[in-house]
């Protein structure tokens, strides 16, 4: 019978009564089986895979706690002292829209100030009051509204914030300085912690004294004295952990003067503008040689090579107190009338020999007056300038003129002529140099008793701030209330050198690959560098200037085509400063008789 039941039955031909009868039989069999096996199942607990049997005396499991987690504890800044410090930091400026953030004025790229502010807030070193979102423009895919909102809320209220230099878009800095009041690792006394943050920030000493012990209110015992350096937050490491890799804090000063201002306490700023020589790829043979427009009687030169000696002579004419209205971008919104600035030092300094492709050493690419034995070597140079303060775009304007001298378009005398504002009161409309090679190299803060008026001071200063650089004393990082570990310092995994190496290495490999490609292409095909006619015809038959298409170097990657070169003093000129200021004041409805303002802004 079992065999018969196990056989497949074709129910398709069964009638309805037969099917109902069959279903009834199966249900009855199922009831009998359940009744037969139910007592056996009740005698032992049911177990499943990977599950232990439940003991009879074991209590049932407690239900899981479904209560919501408590919100995170609110950070209370009033429990800490604050202190005024100075921060020295560096950044590569090509990825940023300059240093300064302008409220309610979105920029296509972030600014250094935005990134710095976000890092200080994220690490809870500053606590500026929240502001309502400002009116923002419409968002775009490249600039979402979230990003615009973050920019609009940047503010430094209550932080005693000051900045030294305001670099433009694309300009880098290796010695930028700010002053700011930040949270200290020293706990505030209980009475002070109960006050509001605004009053405590105003009443707290700028720098805690190292010999001041703190009485514990709970235990009534004297706690160890707080060392303002060794026991302090590792500000450098804390900020570098959240800043982009191309912005690095280098040092902090624990004890700037009580009235310290990164802007007004700085009495000397130093810039460097880097360039190679040759400044662009020379052209071999007669096609690349020319007589210098500034001195037709001089030996022929070759495109791309700069006359370093002539550039140095031009630099010497900059030293001293001069009116630089012809070497800056005039900003009528500031109504400047005093363009005098003191230059302590200006020169062209050799940085290093450049690892450039070997084909540049071929005689056909050297200046015609040079031989293969005595020809110039490819090198990296820097225009170095130190001054009391600088006008807007002053350094890049100086570099532009000095490059014209180096290419032979102008004599070094052009610097003196442009500084003579009595003879040349209106600035010629020449183009300033490219932004990428410019670096704010250092900012100098002398002792207050050594500072002098720029009208009197003739030599530069020495910095007096007590900078603590990364890797020096005070490198402890607090991980808990009771445990402090050495902070990540200068070298090794997580150190600042690792961070900067990563940035450098990527760019170095790009440079090496581009240099190898340049070398290969120069030597491929017809080896024109070895044809003697390129040497024999050099300088022969060249009687005019670079016509019809002069190529002018401005510090960028490629030279600019200028057509027939027109000397600087023959270019179209701007209106006199007084006229520019008057037009702007009239447009704004200002009183033309009001005194001039902001005559000492450093705005490069």
Image: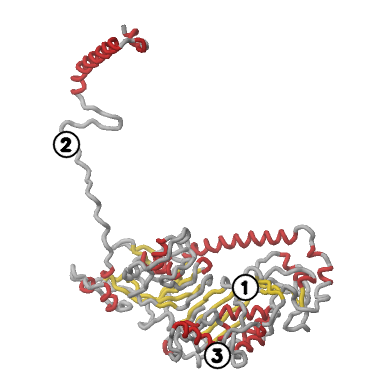
In the image, residue 60 sits, relative to residue 573, either above or below, namely above
Are the residues flagged by discs 2 and 3 in contact, CB closer than 8 Å? no
Neighbor class of circle 2 (other Cα within 10 Å; few <14, some 14-19, many 20+) is few
Q: Is residue 584 left or right of 548 when viewed as pictured?
A: left
Q: Earlier in the sequence, mark 2 or mark 3?
A: 2
Q: Earlier in the sequence, mark 1 or mark 2?
A: 2
> Residue 321: which numbered mark, if any?
3
Are the residues flagged by discs 3 and 1 in contact, CB closer than 8 Å? no
Q: CA distance from mark 3 to mark 1?
A: 26 Å
Q: Earlier in the sequence, mark 3 or mark 1?
A: 3
Residue at the spot of label 2: 59
Asked which secondary structure carries label 3, the reply is strand
293 or 64, which is in the foreground? 293
In the image, residue 23 sits, relative to residue 417, either above or below, namely above
Asked which secondary structure carries label 2, the reply is loop
Residue at the spot of label 1: 555
Q: Residue sitting at 29 percent across and 63 percent down? A: 481
Instruction: Point out the image quarter for the N terminus.
Output: top left
Are the residues flagged by discs 1 and 2 in contact, CB closer than 8 Å? no
118 or 262, which is in the foreground? 118
């Amino acid at each position: 019978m079992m065999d018969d039941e196990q056989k497949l039955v074709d129910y398709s031909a069964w009638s309805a009564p037969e099917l109902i009868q069959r279903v009834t039989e199966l249900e009855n069999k199922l009831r009998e089986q359940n009744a037969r096996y139910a007592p056996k199942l009740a005698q032992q607990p049911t177990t499943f895979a990977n599950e232990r049997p439940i003991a009879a005396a074991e209590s049932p499991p407690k239900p899981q706690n479904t209560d919501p987690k408590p919100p995170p504890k609110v950070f209370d800044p009033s429990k800490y002292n604050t202190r005024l410090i100075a921060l020295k930091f560096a950044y590569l400026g090509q990825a940023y829209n300059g240093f300064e953030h302008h409220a309610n004025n979105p920029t296509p790229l972030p600014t250094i100030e935005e990134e710095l502010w976000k890092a200080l807030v994220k690490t809870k070193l500053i606590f500026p009051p929240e502001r309502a979102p400002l009116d923002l423009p419409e968002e775009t895919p490249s600039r979402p509204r979230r990003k615009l909102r973050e920019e609009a809320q940047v503010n430094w209220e209550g932080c005693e914030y000051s900045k030294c230099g305001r670099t433009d878009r694309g300009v880098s800095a290796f010695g930028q300085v700010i002053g700011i009041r930040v949270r200290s690792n020293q706990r505030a006394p209980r009475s002070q912690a109960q006050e509001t943050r605004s009053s405590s920030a105003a009443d707290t000493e700028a720098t805690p004294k190292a010999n001041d012990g703190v009485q514990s209110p709970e235990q009534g015992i004297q706690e160890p004295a707080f060392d303002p350096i060794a026991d302090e937050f590792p500000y450098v490491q804390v900020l570098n952990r959240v800043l982009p890799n191309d912005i690095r804090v280098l040092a902090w000063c624990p004890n700037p003067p009580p009235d310290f201002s990164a802007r007004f306490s700085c009495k000397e700023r130093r810039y460097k503008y880097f360039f190679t020589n040759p400044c662009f790829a020379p052209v071999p043979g007669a096609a690349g040689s020319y007589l210098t427009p500034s001195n037709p009687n001089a030996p022929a030169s070759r495109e791309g090579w700069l006359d370093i000696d002539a550039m140095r002579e031009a630099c010497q004419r900059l030293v001293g107190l001069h009116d630089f209205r012809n070497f800056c971008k005039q900003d009528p919104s500031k109504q400047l009338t005093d363009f005098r600035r003191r230059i302590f030092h200006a020169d062209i300094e050799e940085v290093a020999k450049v690892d450039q492709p070997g084909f540049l050493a071929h005689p056909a690419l050297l200046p015609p007056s040079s031989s293969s034995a005595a020809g110039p070597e490819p090198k990296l140079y820097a225009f170095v300038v130190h001054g009391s303060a600088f006008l807007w775009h002053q350094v890049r304007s100086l570099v532009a003129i000095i490059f014209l001298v180096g290419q032979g378009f102008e004599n070094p005398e052009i610097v003196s002529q442009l500084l003579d504002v009595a003879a040349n009161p209106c600035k010629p409309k020449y183009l300033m140099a490219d932004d990428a090679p410019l670096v704010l190299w250092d900012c100098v803060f002398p002792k207050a008793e050594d500072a002098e008026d720029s009208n009197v001071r003739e030599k530069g200063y020495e910095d007096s701030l007590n900078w603590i650089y990364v890797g020096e004393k005070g490198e402890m990082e607090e991980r808990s209330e009771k445990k402090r570990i050495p902070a990540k310092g200068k070298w090794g995994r997580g150190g600042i050198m690792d961070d900067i190496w990563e940035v450098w290495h990527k760019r170095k490999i790009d440079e090496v690959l581009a240099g190898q490609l340049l070398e290969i292409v120069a030597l491929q095909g017809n080896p024109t560098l070895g044809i003697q006619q390129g040497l024999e015809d050099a300088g022969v038959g060249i009687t005019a200037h670079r016509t019809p298409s002069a190529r002018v170097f401005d510090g960028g990657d490629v030279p600019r085509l200028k057509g027939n070169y027109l000397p600087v003093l023959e270019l179209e000129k701007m209106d006199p400063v007084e006229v520019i200021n008057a037009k702007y004041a009239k447009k704004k409805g200002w009183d033309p008789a009001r005194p001039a303002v902001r005559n000492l802004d450093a705005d490069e």
